[in-house]
Image (cartoon, rainbow, N blue to C red):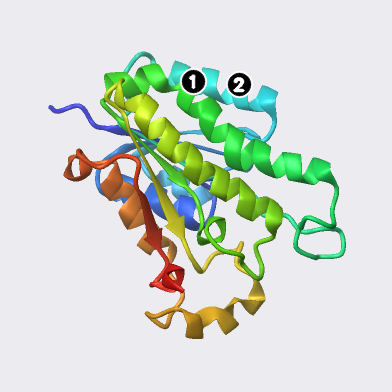
């Protein structure tokens, strides 16, 4: 019986992360996940979702603990995919965008710890397993990392812009190990993170609709398969065309 490929995915408890878990599971992959919360009860019945590790990837100690536990779960077996999906986009106490002129800089640091540093730490810590699996890394960036966004905030946007640049750098360095690194940049996707005001942006989306978590999950999955074996250092926009303006 052929060995089932394994994927590790962060930020799995809702939205894009949860939809991506379902896509990999439906395709028969073994799924190991991480989030700050327990997974929904119905998801625990999924036989392919074999392990969920509760950890705060924005905290260096918790992050290191997750890497150690994930490697224990892998037990020397290959890893075919690492999806760095966990991210935060906080607001100030006054519910404003976390911008350049407002908010505590420690809040900025917290954003970068999760949105930028966690993908580096996980990629380093799981590099051996990825090499054994000739695997792929997919970083979830954002349309907000490429243009000023009315709702995202400067801290979130710059952390995602940094992650886009990191994806290119990682692609070159990890290529020597036989590991591919790409990014997926969602636009306005119907998730809990979406601002209520987002509806006003639909006229600026050529496909005239919000995206679904499944739209993103489909691309993330494909980037981890042999269909994309010659693709690395690429960022795919899942925006309905919004990034063209």
- In the rendered view, tell whether residue 181 sits above or below residue 140: above
Q: Residue at left 29%, top 41%?
A: 224
Q: Residue at left 36%, top 63%?
A: 215
- The answer to the question of whether label 1 and label 2 lie on touching residues, with beta carbons closer than 8 A, is yes
Secondary structure found at label 1 = helix
Q: Return the residue nearer the eye: 173 or 124.
A: 173
Residue 221 seen from this side: yes
Locate residue 57, reporting x and y percent: 62, 34
Q: Residue at left 23%, top 31%?
A: 4
Packing grade of label 2 (10 A; few <14, some 14-19, many >=20) is some
The numbered dot on residue 125 is 1
Q: Residue at left 69%, top 56%?
A: 154
Secondary structure found at label 2 = helix
Residue behind mark 2: 64
Locate residue 42, reporting x and y percent: 47, 52
Label 1 to label 2, Cα distance in Å?
8 Å
Residue 83 seen from this side: no
Q: Earlier in the sequence, mark 1 or mark 2?
A: 2
Picture quadrant where residue 170 is located: top left
């Amino acid at each position: 019986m052929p060995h089932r490929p394994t994927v590790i995915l962060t930020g799995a408890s809702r939205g894009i992360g949860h939809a991506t878990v379902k896509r990999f599971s439906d395709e028969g992959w073994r799924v190991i996940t991480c989030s700050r919360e327990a997974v929904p009860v119905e998801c625990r019945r999924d036989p392919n979702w074999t392990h969920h590790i509760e950890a705060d990837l924005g905290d260096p100690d918790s992050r290191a603990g997750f890497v150690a536990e994930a490697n224990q779960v892998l037990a020397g077996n290959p890893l075919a995919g690492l999806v760095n999906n966990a991210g935060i986009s906080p607001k100030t106490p006054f519910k404003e965008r976390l911008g350049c002129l407002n908010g505590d800089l420690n809040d900025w640091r917290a954003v970068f710890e999760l949105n930028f540093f966690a993908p580096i730490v996980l990629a380093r810590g799981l590099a051996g397993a990825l090499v054994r699996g000739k695997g792929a890394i997919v970083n979830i960036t954002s349309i907000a990392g490429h243009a000023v966004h009315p709702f995202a905030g400067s801290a979130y946007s710059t952390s995602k812009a940094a992650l886009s640049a990191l994806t290119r750098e990682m692609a070159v360095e990890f290529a020597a190990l036989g590991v591919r690194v790409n990014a997926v940049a969602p636009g306005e996707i119907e998730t809990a993170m979406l601002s209520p005001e987002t509806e006003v942006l639909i006229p600026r989306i050529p496909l005239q609709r919000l995206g679904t978590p499944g739209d993103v999950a489909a691309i993330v999955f494909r980037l981890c398969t042999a269909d994309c074996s010659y693709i690395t250092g690429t960022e795919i926009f899942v925006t309905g065309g919004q990034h063209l303006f």
